[in-house]
Amino acid sequence: RSLGEENNFIYIKEEGNESFFFHPLFRQFLMEKATLTMTEEEISTIHLKAADHYLAASQPIKVVPYLLKSGCYKRLSELFQSYGIQLLDDKKQITNLFKSISYKACDQYGWIALFSSMMSPGHSPSSLISLLTIANKNFVKSADQTGELLSLSQQIFLHSFMSGNHKE
């Protein structure tokens, strides 16, 4: 507690909480210093530790940016599989995070492709179908029946909506 009260560079995040954050300028300085003095692997390890911290604190939405920064798409896919609905509760934040997910990650991990199809703004119907097809292929390959069912139901919905059959 006294750390936040006596330091100009560290602030208490919430009253009664033992969470702190760095002043933005000090944070920027530390990040620049880290990129000059640490390897990518060391920085990735730090991001994974932050992800583990937030996961242990039952804050999965805060895990996503750290997994993205670490490039650990396998764990990101597992997070979507385990906490999907909970992650969708904060639609604005998760939508912004999906803007930084690469197509390569979608191509390799079904849950990332599935959630990208649902959360990434600006996709055309054909690109949504493409993402869902990729998701489905990954689910079939990994024998993930839940993922396969979800991706197929989304495809059926989109095809029905695009063809106008939903009006019948």
Image (cartoon, rainbow, N blue to C red):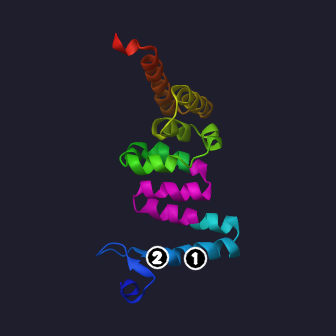
- Give the residue drawn at x 62%, y 54%: 71
Q: Where are the magenta residues, as a range?
A: 47-75
Q: Amino acid at mark 1?
A: Leu
Local crowd size for mark 2, using a 10 Å CA cut-off: few (<14), some (14–19), many (≥20):
some
Residue matched to label 2: 22
Q: Secondary structure at mark 2?
A: strand
- In the depicted view, which residue is nearer to us: 119 or 141? 119
Task: Say which label, 1 or 2, has the lower sequence index.
Answer: 2
Location of residue 91 in the rendering, given as x and y in whole percent from the top left corner: 39, 46
- SS assignment for the magenta stretch, majority: helix
Q: Amino acid at mark 2?
A: Phe
Q: Is residue 103 left or right of residue 58?
A: right
Label 1 and label 2: CA atoms lie apart by 10 Å
Label 1 with label 2: CB-CB less than 8 Å: yes
Residue matched to label 1: 30
Question: How many marks do you count on the picture?
Answer: 2
- Give the residue drawn at x 51%, y 76%: 25
Question: The N terminus lies in which quarter of the figure?
Answer: bottom left
